[in-house]
Amino acid sequence: MIKLGVNGKEVTLDLDPETPLLWALRDELRLTGTKFGCGVAQCGACTVMLDGMPRRSCVTPIGSIDGSEVTTIEGMEGPEIEAVQAAWAALDVPQCGWCQSGQVMSATALLQLVSNPTDEDIDNAMNGNVCRCATYVRIRQAIHDAAKTLEG
Amino acid sequence: MTHVSPQLSRRGFLAGTAGFTLALTLPLGGARAQSAAASGSAPFAPNAFVRIASDDTVTVMIKHLEMGQGPYTGLATLVAEELDADWSQMRAEGAPGNDALYANLLFGAQGTGGSTAMANSYMQMRKAGAAARAMLVEAAAAEWGVPAEEITVSAGKVAHPSGKSSGFGALAATAAGMAVPEDPPVKDPKDFVLIGTDRPKLDSVAKANGTAGFTMDVYREGMLTVVVARAPKFGAKLRSVDDAAALQVKGVEMVREISSGVAVYATGTFAALKGRDALVLEWDESGAETRSSAQMLQDLSDAAKAGGAMVEEAGDAGAIDGAAEVLEAEFRFPYLAHAPMEPLDAVIETKEGKAEMWFGSQFPSFDKPTAAGVLGMKPEDVQINVLLAGGSFGRRAQGSAHLAKEVAEVAKAAGRDGVFKLVWTREDDLQGGYYRPATVHRLRAGIDAEGRIVGWENAVANQSIMAGTPMEGMMQNGLDPTSYEGSNDLPYDVGARRITWARVDSPVPVLWWRSVGHTHTAYAVEVFLDEVLEKAGKDPVQGRLDLMLPEATRQRAVLEKVAEIANWSGRRAEGKGYGVALAKSFGTYVAQILEVEDRNGFPHVTQVWCAVDCGVAVNPNVIRAQMEGGIGYALGTALFNEITLGEGGGVEQHNFDGYRMLRISEMPKVEVAILQSGEDPTGVGEPGVPPLAPALANAWRALTGQTVHQLPFSTLTA
Ligand code: FES
Ligand code: FES
């Protein structure tokens, strides 16, 4: 039995402790906003917050994070995610959309740490998030726009 | 994906469209009209495409798969325009698999591909919107007792000069009882309010907050997740299975043999994967492809050298041999995987002789009968719900319907009714074939003493995409145009011409990949031409303009436009190289100029300028997005991507570590200019791709002097 806090609720998982957090979230908890793209920490589609920091859920066995607090895109709150999602919609960033939960999570994590990121900060924070539709031009602009909104 | 229909004349196209809309409109409209009026709650559905609900929302049933190229927004725009709706009331929903209602008018069957969504829907969706508008006006006239001609509709409001006004929802019940107009008039383009302007895409919010529903997100009661162990080499057959250890894995419920391999059924994805890992399998490789891809490219080169079927022949066959100077080059292109971000997946539920499927079906008209055939059902007993797809780039457009077949076999092999979700992993995706065919082009050109091109030869060799699929019937005289399209019918005067195609078969399955033949033909043609122009002492832009045939007015216009926005003649920064390329694909004209730097012997692209002519620009925002995305997709591919078979025939790439995607730090700035046009709209999903790689090679040669005749660029440094 593994206990986790997920989006503010306590959950108990009766699963193989090797099970990646990604599949526990999706198959058990039906939190489908977190996506599968590679399974080997090469694409970022599965990004969640683990105790407040971005983490690739596809390579995180649930047995290794017993007692941790997980936040998925469904449970994100606060000015950063609101600014990011508003900028995403205003610029129509998504194309197919499959990578975008992960992009939004990583962008939010960046803005929580760095309120006014440079292009280089964006490269560093977002380089692990692949977008096969190559929506990168708009991702970059949307992060700058969100930072501006947060500045007020 | 491909040109699967003959070019229709404008006249034929419009006539066909109108007839089709009419056929659709009458039965459905009439039937729905009664029930809606009677119950007062059902939405007003004047035809198969438009539903108006009492809360004023207008939902457009989108007959094309939304995989990121924007048909939800684009087709809803057409309806909204003629309906005079407000954009905020518009919604979009994927239409189910139904050839009779939702055929692609250019294919004659339901399917998305060849960048045809906008082209074939343009008049059909406008008529659908216009019919709904006419019925709302009739309804208002009847309710208010005023002449219909005095009623106006604007931004979702129906109004009369007397001061009476209403939203659509309040009129829906009455409108449903009105006669469906046979051939409602559509607007003069000068009166367009929405078409040609930017407006938010309908699916952006749900895709930014994780609520958009894709196939992998479908969960149903009692569902089992299934993964399949497939052959390690193309064409290998299963010899034996030992599933004892797999069945011991907690959560694994059964293991079954199907035609593509061995299926493991489990209560969750991880258990299924663990069970698959525990299988002990033996394969018979006697019929398998065991050549390495290096050997295959050599074989393609030999085949090209030997000639092939004539695709185009004009002028004096001896022109090149008699020329003052002769240039020759061979270009080699690898297999490519599409690697859509959401790997292939499909959900099927079987119940008492019927089946229901949920997936990103790109060709429902192949998928449905294929699944029905496997299950021994009538096609009408198989329902396909078409969901959002996390990318395709051609991967889901399967003439073979192999995904529908596989998931149907999974359901059948279970031996009982149930719900099954088939999931491909990234490894399954990259190793599973259906690649862009590996290809060789051998080119020759002759230049006379004045620097004029007097002759041009191109010998292409690769596998056929259509042969052996239900699309084989579209090949003519044994020619598969998707193998060489773009190598013939050049917009340039290159003197005598000889274009051949050699078909070389292999057990490696191949498929159209975003822009199909143009993925390699544009590269071979535009890079070789650039080298020939250089030899002749010509500027790449002016040299192309000088060669342009008089009828190539749209090619000329995009080339001039891109040169203008990039400031081609004036822009020359220290340490940067500039290159240009041009391609017409799927009826759309695109020219690109690219700026590159040399970073430790490898290209880093800093900026791309792009000019596009796709006829009437229905949604400039979507067009720009597709150019940006096409540029990034093509750039990552040109720099990094090849699927290779090692000695013995096994695929050497497993995941994104070996098949590397472009990352944000590698994405150039992009500036897009859309040409003003009154021509019927053409597609934008693919045409942004072809010019990018040749523009890169041309820029790189200008900067470093190095020619690049083999892709990807990473083989330069390897
Ligand atoms: S699915 Fe986790 S990084 Fe790709
Ligand atoms: S939007 Fe398609 S992968 Fe990013």
Image (spheres, helix red, strand yellow):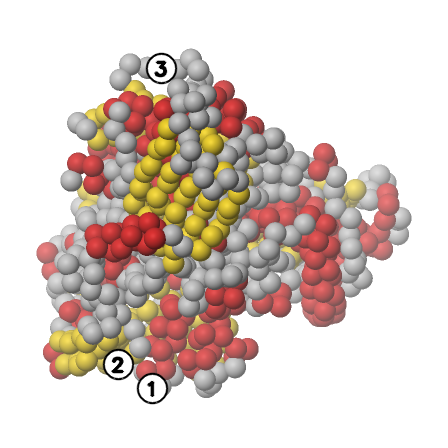
- As shown in the figure, which amino acid type bears the numbered disc 1? Gly
Q: Position of residue B198 (x, y in %)?
A: 56, 35
Residue at x 32%, y 38% (from the top left corner): B329
Q: Nearer the viewer, residue A39 or B704?
A: B704
If you read the primary sequence from the N terminus, does the residue marked by circle 2 or circle 3 appear first?
2
- The label on residue B572 is 3
Residue tagged by mark 1?
A: B415
Q: Residue at x 52, y 61 (%)?
A: B476
- Pick the quarter of the image with the C terminus of chain A: top left
Check whether the beta carbons of the residues at disc 1 and disc 2 lie within 8 A of each other: yes
Residue type indicated by callout 2: Arg
Q: Which mark is residue B256?
A: 2
Q: Position of residue B578 (x, y in %)?
A: 35, 23
User: Residue B687: in sight, yes or no?
Assistant: no
Q: Disc 2 is attached to a residue of which chain?
A: B
Left or right of residue B633, residue B10 in this image = right
Name the chain letter of the residue that bears numbered label 3: B
Residue B650 in sight = yes
Q: Which mark is residue B337?
A: none
